[in-house]
Image (cartoon, rainbow, N blue to C red):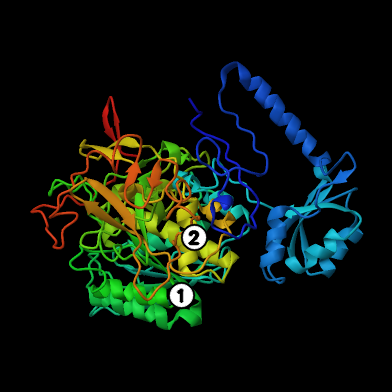
Amino acid sequence: MKRQTELRTYPPLSNSTSWGAGSRNTKNDNGRQTGQKPSRCSFASWGGRIAAILATCLVVLAAAPTALAKNGRKAPKVSPALQQLLNTASPSKVVDVIVQYKGKPQQKDLAKVAGKGGKSKRHLGIIQGEAYTIPLSAVSDLASDAGVAHISLDHKIRKRANFDTAREAINTDIAQSYGYDGTGVGIAIVDSGVYAHPDLNLFGTNNQRVVYSESFVPGDASPSDGYGHGTHVAGLAAGDAQSSQSNYQFQYTGVAPNANIINLRVLDANGSAADSDVIAAIDRAIQLQSQYNIRVLNLSLGRPIFESYTADPLCQAVEQAWNAGIVVVVAAGNDGRDNSLGTNGYGTVSAPGNDPYVITVGAIDTTDVNPANDSIASYSSKGPALLDQIVKPDIVAPGNRVVSLLAPNTTLVNNFSPYVVFPCDSTGTICGSSYGAPQYFTLSGTSMATPLVSGAAALMIQKDPTLTPDLVKARLMKTAFKGFPSYSTVVDSMGNVYNEEGDVFTYGTGVMDVAAALNNTDTGTGYALSPSAVFDSTTNTVSIVQTVPTTLSVLWGDSVLWGDSVLWGDSVLWGDSAFVNGSSVLWGDSVLWGDSVLWGDSVLWGDSVLWGDSVLGMSAADPGDCKLTSNGTVCH
């Protein structure tokens, strides 16, 4: 049995250029990507082996300063992460670095850095080093200095974990260690508004990164958040954790903590809006695209499917954003518990998440930082999308009991005070109102998973601004973690138990892995439309077919993207447990899509929409999935 917490290693950013089978990432036995990563020592309890492990870690740490040159071979003077910044970022970008010298740094060394616009922050005598803040333009000159041994980024080290479990499970910490933070990328948040939270300022300043705000709520011109949802969403995409640097158990950092936010308010104080409000906001995002470099559009909202995506005005609006070059990321919906039509939650994806052009996101419940131990959230809506049978969701991300920004005096915060996250004492173990006003709030839903994907898209675009929405989608789907459990059991706050299956309509292509997506440099031409599922009632089999308008070429083509002989590749996109031969799709060892699915012609595969009398969706008061223990249901 594997340890619960594993050391995961990642390669440096790769230079592969093709989508064929030869470009597949090497995986370890858990399906995680493998390669180089700075050494880490795990002090997990292994009984009698702990002393040896500690000793080994101490040896490694002690040897690190002298490892710069060994057997006459010199290591690169500039660390890979810093080199990546040199290759991609503006020379005027100011960074924090640590310079290790071959001898004790002298005043002339400090003066040389000062002459290039830098300044010393701290003397590091134990490693014959100096910590500087310098422009990137000075790094190359420093590297050419014969007295300099090595230059690296001054990475942030934070207590307990750089991120809470939700962020770390998708490798946000590793992705950000590459030097990307969303700088220069605009993320449009179409939601309930965004409160002027300190975590949405430029870090260490009062300069807001919410660069544009407008309300589309009829009769309410205020763009501020009256519901409390949009601020939470914005924080997951782009919060910078200013408010949790020292007095919280974790630092609640968004995936792209320096991206700009374009606040387009459509939901009123009760969390409601009309299609026309949302469409008007999407239109404004397209109009403002060039002014604010809007490359990502986040829609943590939705409603039932009433007609084909080819006619639905909401779907047509998101397609216009896609056509303008904007990555559209949409929540799958929170109706996965709905069994009113006997489908066990299948066929509950909402609009516009049913549109094949967008990235549709489901939610998982994170047990720990290893997604192999996580389960799908019981409320996460499942595909296929009604009417058009589009295979959805495309990807999943953490969405259960996720902490993000609190907007004070809003409907959610005022009505659901138990979800408020208070600051703590110096030990980080005793928390409450006596230690200050709360800055964070806990919510659950695919709405929370969606901005994590939006933030990842912003990082990818910062790294390579030439990426199209289709390449962003394809890379995210290809690199998603596919070692999720085939079966899982989850429980809600009322003690209701849900037996979930790990199939394509539940997890899509897998759990988002931000670091793997950034590492991927595969390319291609065409369009990354989500495929369609076709049910054959005579054989009880399902085929995946391309969703291809006749005027388009498709990025998922047989030889363009996923290999020469198979439409998706037998292990490239769906993982080793999915086999695609053009006529049927088998998921798992012995079941077709999951043996709990009932393929009713009039429900999932019909050409008309049927709605049950009761929809067991998740209300705002729902704490999300919980744990069933000997003492009952525990939600924390």
* Residue 217 visible in image: no
Of the residues under marks 2 and 1, which one precedes in the sequence?
Answer: 1
The residue sitting at the left extreme is 613
Instruction: Say which of 186 and 211 sits in front.
Output: 186
Name the amino acid, label 2: Ser
User: Where residue 148 sits in the image (x, y, percent)?
Assistant: 86, 54
Q: Residue at the spot x=58%, y=51% of the render? A: 22
Crowd rating for badge 1 (residues with CA inside 10 Å; few <14, some 14–19, many 20+): some
Which label number is shown at residue 559? 2
In this rendering, position of residue 323 left or right of residue 591: right
Quadrant in which the C terminus is drawn: top left
Q: Which residue is mark 1?
A: 325
Instruction: Say which of 409 and 459 sits in front.
Output: 459
User: Where residue 259 sits in the image (x, y, percent)?
Assistant: 52, 67
The number of numbered badges drawn on the structure is 2
Mark 2 vs mark 1: give the one in front.
Answer: 2
How far apart, in angstroms, are the residues tagged by discs 2 and 1? 24 Å
The residue sitting at the top extreme is 48
Q: Residue at the spot x=54%, y=62% of the render? A: 459
User: Where residue 615 sits in the image (x, y, percent)?
Assistant: 15, 52
Which label number is shown at residue 180? none
In this rendering, position of residue 425 left or right of residue 41: left
Q: Is residue 280 above or below residue 612?
A: below
Confirm or deny contact between disc 2 and disc 1 (CB under 8 A).
no
- The image quarter containing residue 523 is bottom right
Name the amino acid, label 1: Gly
User: Where residue 153 sits in the image (x, y, percent)?
Assistant: 70, 54
In this rendering, position of residue 321 left or right of residue 245: left
Crowd rating for badge 2 (residues with CA inside 10 Å; few <14, some 14–19, many 20+): some
Instruction: Say which of 114 and 317 sits in front.
Output: 317
Q: Is residue 482 above or below residue 136?
A: above
